[in-house]
């Protein structure tokens, strides 16, 4: 990959106000998107801070992308149906990589960042839930701070902020897949 060491791409982090964020996040995704993959967007539309994944799924479906996308505003993947959806994914996409998208809580400095990581997402971890991990790769949007005394911070997030973050993630996936499609043809 352009003479850049692979370990640089094991974890990347960019703030949504960085005008190059979607382009820079798309770089490691191009490699992943050149092989079969599925995007799994986790969260619920019942909590603004946790709606990042479903908003990304909704955006991708509206772009009419050529790859499978699970988890949208209309059909979210959340704590109540995650295990069932994981079984469906294993049955139908066993030879595909999974790119998981989810909101997260973090420290004050990381709010507004989108992180790409090799490895799974652990949904619900920030609010004390024990759910199965999902994904070979992760796109995580840090939507608010972790408050050890009150996990309700995720309910105080502005919708416009989450939508802006969803747009950046959607754009990076679109850029990665768009260039991967041209590379194959």
Image (cartoon, grey):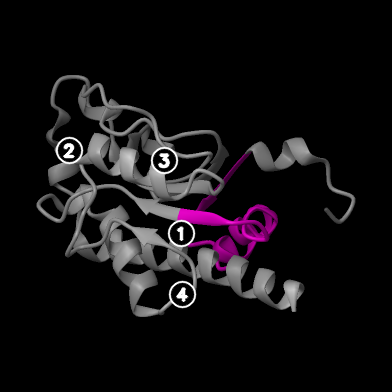
Closer to the eye: label 3 or 2: 3
Tag 2–tag 4 contact (CB < 8 Å): no
Looking at the rendered structure, the secondary structure element under dot 3 is helix
Q: Kindly identify which residue carries mark 3.
A: 90
Q: Which mark is residue 16?
A: 1
Tag 4–tag 1 contact (CB < 8 Å): no
Judge the density around disc 1: few (<14), some (14-19), many (≥20) Cα neighbours within 10 Å.
many
Q: Which residues are magenta?
A: 11-38
Relative to residue 174, is residue 127 drawn left or right?
left
Closer to the eye: label 3 or 1: 3
Residue shown at 40%/36% (left/top)? 134
Q: Which mark is residue 136?
A: none
Residue 185 to residue 176: above or below: below
Q: Kindly identify which residue carries mark 4.
A: 65
Labels 2 and 4: the sequence-earlier one: 4
Measure the alpha-carbon separation of dots 2 and 4: 33 Å
Judge the density around disc 2: few (<14), some (14-19), many (≥20) Cα neighbours within 10 Å.
some
Labels 3 and 2: the sequence-earlier one: 3
Looking at the rendered structure, the secondary structure element under dot 2 is helix
């Amino acid at each position: 990959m352009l003479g850049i060491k692979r370990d640089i791409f094991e974890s990347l982090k960019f703030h949504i106000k960085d005008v190059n964020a979607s382009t820079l996040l798309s770089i490691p995704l191009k490699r992943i998107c050149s092989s079969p993959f599925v995007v799994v967007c986790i969260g619920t539309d019942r909590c603004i801070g946790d709606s990042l994944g479903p908003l990304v799924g909704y955006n991708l479906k509206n772009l009419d992308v050529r790859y499978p996308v699970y988890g949208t505003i209309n059909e979210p993947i959340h704590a109540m149906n995650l295990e069932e959806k994981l079984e469906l994914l294993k049955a139908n996409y066993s030879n595909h990589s999974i790119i998981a998208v989810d909101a997260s809580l973090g420290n004050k400095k990381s709010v507004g960042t989108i992180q790409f990581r090799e490895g799974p997402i652990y949904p619900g971890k920030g609010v004390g839930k024990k759910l199965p991990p999902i994904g070979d790769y992760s796109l995580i949007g840090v939507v608010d701070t972790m408050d050890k005394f009150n996990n309700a911070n995720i309910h105080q997030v502005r919708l416009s902020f989450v939508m802006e973050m969803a747009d950046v993630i959607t754009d990076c996936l679109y850029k990665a897949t768009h260039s991967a499609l041209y590379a194959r043809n």
